[in-house]
Image (spheres, rainbow, N blue to C red):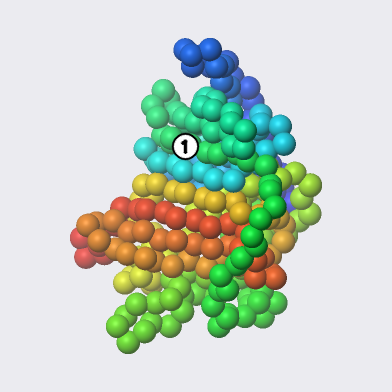
Amino acid sequence: MPAPDALAEMLRLLTLRPGAGLDSGDGRVGETVIGDTPDWFGEVLFGGFVVAQAVAAVTRDAPEGRRLHSLHAYFLRPVIARTEVVYRIRPIRDGRAFSSRHLEATQGGKPVLEMSCSFTSEGDGYVYDLPGAADGPGPDGVAQEDGPGPWVARYLGPTAARADGTRESTHRMWFRIPHALPEDEPLHQALLAFASDWTGVGGRPLDLEGDTTGMTSLDHAVWFHRPGRADEWLYYDVQSLVNAGGRGLLRGVMRDRAGRVVISVAQEMRLVPVESRG
């Protein structure tokens, strides 16, 4: 199990310090914040960490009474470890039901991430959840492994290949942080944004035995359908929809133990075939 200081380090890294204000030129003043980066992943940061820190940045001053419900991010350059990242947040629009924000992350003066996000308040309406596959065990029957930073995971692996070689799921796991966290929805959203990129090699179904060499995230979208807690077990089911043109698209769903959809994800990546590495 990860040591409590791994969680303390994650929380510290998600606590950003203020920078200079940002004048958008149209009378709307944005915010600049600065974040430190860890060396957990080697020289280049895991993309999920950058998205998590971006969520922490954009939710610092969320519109009153509204919660983050979606984000769409583009990875522009690798983010280097142990070097600070500057996040500039600009308000786009505050409407009657939704608020939009734009975020730009830079490192060394060069853009590394662009993100648009939307906030809204919860409303009454239809409630519907498409059931997930029922062929996987719950977390209690699976061996636990340490994940990155403060996380633990219980991996189920992909579903069996069909006769044509395709699979229903290419990456499945239960995951959580095994330490109690505060009642702070923006914090849980930032942590779950980190986990949204924890898809292993699930975007490359024809080579599920290899590592992530040759896989580079291009863009990443997350929808926060319901409040979720990072310190409770969530089930992440990833499906590879298509590999074509040197790119792959996957989609993922996080469910709570009751089977309710908490978060859904879509991600496109650049794929270099195994035989082309060298």
Identity of the residue drawn at 62% across and 33% down: 96
Identity of the residue drawn at 45% across and 73% down: 169
Rendered-image quadrant of the C terminus: bottom left
Label 1: which secondary element: strand
Identity of the residue drawn at 32% across and 80% down: 165
Closer-to-camera residue (268/176): 268
Left or right: where does residue 237 sit relative to residue 276?
Answer: right
From this viewpoint, is residue 146 visible? no
Q: How far across and down, in percent of the image, does residue 31 sit? A: 58, 22
Q: How far across and down, in percent of the image, does residue 117 sit? A: 52, 38
Which amino acid, mark 1? Met
Q: How far across and down, in percent of the image, does residue 185 sit? A: 71, 45
Where is 260 relative to 226, above or below? below
Closer-to-camera residue (188/17): 188
Left or right: where does residue 128 sit relative to residue 246?
Answer: right
Residue identifier under label 1? 115
Indicate the quadrant where residue 145 lies. bottom right
Closer-to-camera residue (165/209): 165
Rendered-image quadrant of the N terminus: bottom right
Where is 258 relative to 197, above or below? below
Indicate the quadrant where residue 18 lies. top right
Query: How many numbered dots are placed on residues in this image?
Result: 1
From this viewpoint, is residue 228 visible? yes
Q: How far across and down, in percent of the image, does residue 208 sit? A: 38, 71
